[in-house]
Image (cartoon, rainbow, N blue to C red):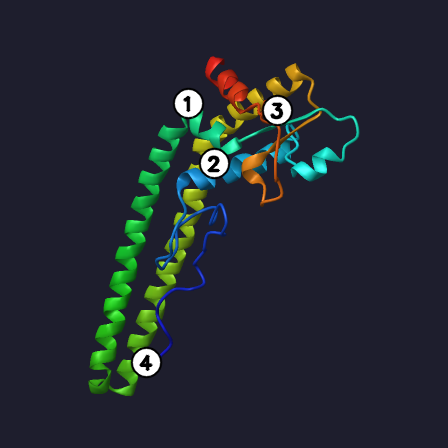
């Protein structure tokens, strides 16, 4: 009989800094920290809103006459009020989702194992009926995995939206006040930055702006 372990519902987390939008799967996989996922979301949002241009240092240097600076967006995120609570809340809820999926998977595995042990004693008709039961159980597991992934994604967005707004507002205010044409993120580079003038680091200013904002 075909394997009853779900695969179509699985979603792995993309490597490097992160693994995926939602860490719910119908089978166990290594998962990234919530900090990692939240940081990646922050970097993506910054680019989408156009408040800050996140460019590799080499490209930024090619912009003639442009005033540039940099931040460590990961460090900013970790110092942002509300992040720790959002991370804790999301992690707790996600663990609940994972626990539910593990129980469903264990139940399916147990039923499949029981069928394999007793199949030699079953008639062809009984075997067919049992296989259909297992397929239906697997389908239910995959459907629930999909529902929990959607729910996890929604909760992640709900928890992160206020943090996104606060961080991006602070970055834009610091950029505008300093007259910078662009700010790039050193924590997002892939080994392209060899050396940088630390006097251009605006990380602490952005953190101060965030903490001083109401």
Image location of residue 149, percent across then percent down: 42, 49
Asked if labels 4 and 3 touch by Cβ distance under 8 angstroms, the answer is: no
Q: Nearer the viewer, residue 199 or 122?
A: 199
Indicate which label's residue lies in the foreground, 2 or 4: 2
Q: In this rendering, which labeled residue sits more in front, label 4 or label 1?
A: 1
Residue 154 appearing in the image:
no
In the rendered image, residue 96, in percent from the top left (x then y), is placed at 30, 45
In three-dimensional space, the C-alpha distance between marks 3 and 4, rounded to whole angstroms, equals 70 Å
Image location of residue 207, percent across then percent down = 49, 21
Q: Is residue 90 above or below residue 120?
A: above
Q: Which residue is mark 2?
A: 157
| Front one among 109 and 165 | 165
Report if residue 142 is visible in the image: yes
Upstream in sequence: badge 3 or badge 4: 4
Residue farthest toward the right in the current orientation of the protein: 64
- Residue 128, labelled with which disc? 4
Residue at 32%, 50% in the rendered image? 98
Please tell me which of labels 4 and 1 falls first in the chain: 1
Q: For the point 46% across and 17% down, which residue is it?
A: 211
| Disc 4 element | helix
Residue sitting at x 49%, y 17%: 208
Callout in the foreground (3, 4): 3
Task: Give the residue pinned by disc 3.
Answer: 200
Residue that label 1 marks: 81
Disc 1 is placed on an element classified as: loop
Q: In the drawing, does residue 124 fall left or right of residue 172?
A: left
Select label 2 or label 3 by which is in front.
Answer: 3
Query: Do the residues under discs 2 and 4 have CB atoms within 8 angstroms?
Result: no
């Amino acid at each position: 009989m075909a394997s009853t372990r779900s695969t179509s519902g699985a979603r792995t987390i993309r490597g490097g800094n992160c693994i995926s939008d939602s860490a719910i799967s119908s089978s166990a996989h290594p998962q990234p920290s919530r900090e990692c996922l939240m940081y990646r979301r922050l970097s993506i949002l910054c680019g989408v809103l156009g408040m800050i241009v996140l460019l590799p240092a080499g490209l930024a240097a090619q912009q003639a006459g442009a005033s540039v600076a940099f931040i460590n967006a990961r460090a900013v995120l970790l110092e942002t009020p509300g992040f720790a609570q959002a991370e804790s809340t999301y992690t707790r809820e996600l663990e609940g989702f994972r626990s539910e999926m593990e129980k469903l998977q264990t139940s399916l595995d147990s039923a499949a194992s029981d069928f394999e042990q007793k199949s030699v004693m079953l008639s062809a008709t009984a075997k067919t009926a049992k296989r259909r039961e297992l397929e239906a159980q697997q389908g239910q597991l995959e459907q629930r995995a999909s529902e929990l992934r959607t729910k996890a994604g929604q909760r992640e967005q709900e928890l992160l939206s206020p943090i996104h707004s606060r961080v991006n507002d602070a970055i834009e205010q610091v950029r505008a006040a300093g007259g910078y044409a662009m700010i790039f993120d050193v924590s997002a580079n892939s080994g392209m930055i060899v050396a940088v003038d630390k006097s251009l680091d605006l990380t602490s200013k952005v953190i101060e702006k965030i903490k001083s904002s109401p």
